Amino acid sequence: MSNITSPGTPETSRQVGRSALVWRRLRQSRTGMTGLVIVLVFLLIALAAWTGLIGQEWSRVTGGRWETPGAGHLMGTNMLGQDILERAVFSTRTAFQVGLLVAILSTALGAVMGALAGWYSHSLLDEIVLWLKGVLDSIPFYLFVAAVAFAMKGNAWAMHIAMIATFWTSTGRLVRGEVMRLKNRQFVEAAHSIGLPDYQIVFRHILPNTMPILLVQASLVFVAAIKTEVILSFLGLGVQDGVSWGLMLAESTQEVVAGQFGNFIAASGMLFLLLMGFNMLADAFQDAFDAKDTVV
């Protein structure tokens, strides 16, 4: 048993030391900690909506048409008499649901495809993966996502599938290059020498060393997924059985003409804050994972 785990031991120790250094640098970043606080606040709002503590009255008509902000409705009501704040809060749940699902699955898909392409570089498998990424990247992004979502219209997961099918390519390209670099390291040669199969070397010893790339990419995909959901929902190709900031912005196009800005301010304001927080956190992650400064 000791022979099997020994190849990964030096790398594991290095990763532990690197993780501690990365976390220390992240804590020292004012921008990163500010972004982390913003994201955590929105996460708490989403969790509260998920557990039914808040936002459950988003679809009920609880007031009159376009009521002004007051004690009963802190941000007023929309044209149907629904509470705007309730809808904005519940939309936070929708944003996290879409962002987390797409970020996790597309990053995992990109990691697997990139790892296989990098391990079997310059082979037929590598050429197929590179060709697939090239084809997907050559198609205008929003046009492709909208086309897939429209083709699967009526399917609750159409939007998610469309984004996962396109967002993995950047992660796959980065992981491929990193795996090509790592597969010549000594710990991989040691794993080869004791007869470990390729899949075990790739998924147990190489992929864990690409975690910095995967974390940064996942945070960037999370932001991209939320923005894409808002655009698709605005166009009527996104959320079908709920509410989102995109649907609120689509609704506000009729209200702004009538001088009502509650939906627009609530949806765009919360969207701006969450995306700003995640962008700040992603930038801090990239700085903290800078290989020149964090190699132990």
Image (tube, rainbow, N blue to C red):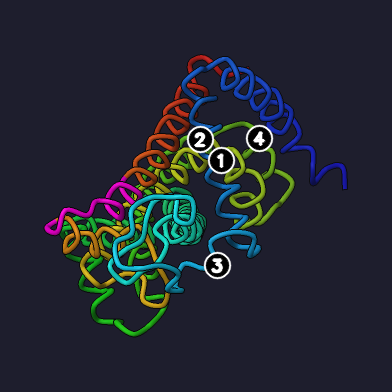
| Residue topped by disc 4 | 187
Do callouts 3 and 4 mark residues in contact (Cβ within 8 Å)? Answer: no
Q: Residues within 10 Å of mark 3 (few under 14, many from 20)?
A: some
Mark whose residue sits in front, 4 or 2: 2
Residue located 68% across and 26% down the image: 14
| Residue topped by disc 2 | 38
Label for residue 56?
3
Range shown magenta: 257-268
Label for residue 98?
none
Could you tell me residue 171's position as x and y percent? 40, 48
Give the side of residue 281 with respect to residue 65, left or right: right
Give the side of residue 21 with respect to residue 253, left or right: right
- One can see residue 295 in this view: yes
Q: Give the Cα separation between the discs numbered 3 and 2.
A: 23 Å
Question: Disc 1 marks which amino acid?
Answer: Val
Q: Give the Cα separation between the discs numbered 1 and 4.
A: 41 Å
Q: Is residue 264 magenta?
A: yes
Give the structural element (helix, strand or loop) at label 1: helix
Give the structural element (helix, strand or loop) at label 4: helix
Residue located 47% across and 38% down the image: 216
| Residue topped by disc 1 | 41
Question: Disc 2 marks which amino acid?
Answer: Ile
Question: Disc 3 marks which amino acid?
Answer: Gln
